[in-house]
Amino acid sequence: MWKENILEDLEVGEIEYKPAGEFLAGVKREFGGGDKEAVKVAELRKLEQEGRTMEEFVQEFKRAVRESGYKGRPLIEEFKREMNGMIRWKLMETERLPTSIEQWYEHAINLDRHWRESKREKKILREQWKQEGPAPKQ
């Protein structure tokens, strides 16, 4: 058992000295320092999509989910929380919300692709308009 004043106990001989590796292994056993599930949950909670494509984000999210213990609705809620707000908002407006995490991944990836394509087209049209001026009215 680990005591509060370990140094005092070592000095008075109440506990014996252990090699550093053995000592550290004992500390990890007693105080944690590697609960895989807790580490994975913390890793998952720090994720954000930011400027990445949804495909990139989904891959990282899936890696973080492994061994996190998240399943079902809590997993979906975590995914929604971490994706970009615009895509989340568009997904929430759909007539039929996805019901599984795989459906959420698929719908989010599709929306992200469409949104990025729309941005590219808007940029091209803006450049054309700058060069050619507005299209004549008929």
Image (cartoon, rainbow, N blue to C red):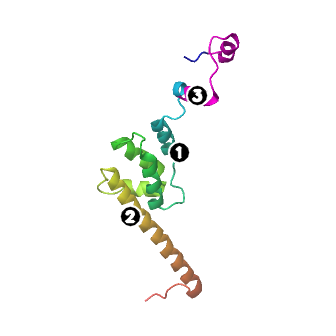
What residue is rendered at 42% in x and 54% in y?
A: 89
114 left or right of 43? left
Q: Main secondary structure of the magenta part?
A: helix
Q: What is the secondary structure assignment of the residue under circle 1?
A: helix
Residue 28 coordinates in the image, percent (x, y)? 55, 29
Depicted 70 relative to depicted 122: above or below:
above
Q: What is the secondary structure assignment of the residue under circle 3?
A: helix
What residue is rendered at 41% in x and 46% in y?
A: 66
Residue 109 coordinates in the image, percent (x, y)? 40, 61
Question: Looking at the image, which residue sits at the far right?
Answer: 11
137 left or right of 102? right
Q: Which residue is mark 3?
A: 22
Q: Are marks 2 and 1 in contact (CB under 8 Å)?
A: no
Depicted 36 relative to depicted 87: above or below:
above
20 left or right of 112? right
Residue type at mark 1: give it.
Lys
* Quadrant occupied by the N terminus: top right
Front label number (2 vs 1): 1
Q: CA distance from mark 3 to mark 2?
A: 52 Å
93 left or right of 4? left
Along the viewing direction, whichever of 122 and 65 lies nearer the viewer: 65
Residue type at mark 3: give it.
Glu
Q: Which residue is mark 2?
A: 110
Depicted 47 relative to depicted 133: above or below:
above
Q: Is residue 92 magenta?
A: no
Mark 1, residues whose alpha carbon is within 10 Å: few (<14), some, or many (≥20)? few
Magenta residues (range): 4-28
Q: CA distance from mark 1 to mark 3?
A: 32 Å
Q: Which residue is mark 1?
A: 46
Residue 29 coordinates in the image, percent (x, y)? 52, 27
